[in-house]
Amino acid sequence: MKPLFVAVISALFAPVAALAVNAIHYKTLNGWDILMDQTLGNACYVTTAYEGGTILRLGFDFTGATGRFYLALGNTNWQSLEAGKDYPIEIKFDDQPVWTATARGADFANSKWLHVTTENSNFADEFSRKLGMRVTFQGRQIAALRLKGSARAIDEMLACQKTVNSVVGAQRPQPPSPPKDPFAPAPGAKNANDPFDL
């Protein structure tokens, strides 16, 4: 079993109105939407919906000291799931070893959600390379999802992040350039011996 190191981020589940204002659409590709979420430090993510009402979202989170990936699963049918509670789940990609995680319950966009984060990039790599993902809670399967097109979607998410980073980097104020003659008096400096030197 692989451990999925978890840190809970309540900012992901901000009010719907705030999310609508802060999510910017980048591209749609084979049923996957690629967006950028300003509430997560201008981080890009992929999302898709399945029959049965399950919504999947995977992306970056730059709100902490280190960048992380997160996976969120939502469904309107999960009415007994409680916001703020921890749920031990297992995530399995095809025939790969199981990822164990503690998901946090949340209410968001009229659905109940499970949310986990990891700093392990192998998680996103398996997500992009495998055909399917199964999620279980207490031995019961809660989601069996095909990941058709996930490799291209993750490639576009990376392209989205590269674009966002270049735009955000270009908007950062540049430090002033050093003077050509560091020994010349600074502009506006007064002569300390002559108080009338204006």
Image (cartoon, rainbow, N blue to C red):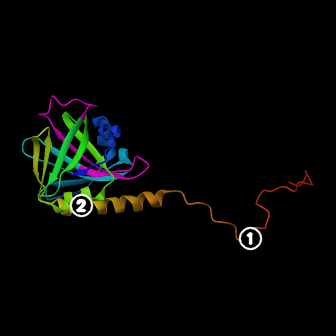
- Residue drawn at the location 76% of the way across and 60% of the way down: 187
State which region is magenta. Answer: 58-86
**In the image, residue 138 lies at what x, y percent?**
14, 37
**In the image, residue 27 lies at what x, y percent?**
23, 57
- Give the number of the disc on residue 119: none
Work out which quarter of the rendered image holds the C terminus and state it.
bottom right
Residue nearest the viewer, comparing 106 with 171: 106
- Give the number of the disc on residue 125: 2
Instruction: Say which quarter of the image contains residue 114.
Output: top left
Q: Amino acid at mark 2?
A: Asp
Residue nearest the viewer, comparing 46 with 193: 46
Considering every residue shown, the one lying at the far front of the view is 1
- Residue drawn at the location 29% of the way across and 41% of the way down: 20
Q: Secondary structure at mark 1?
A: loop
Write down the residue under mark 1: 181
Q: Amino acid at mark 1?
A: Asp
Q: Secondary structure at mark 2?
A: helix
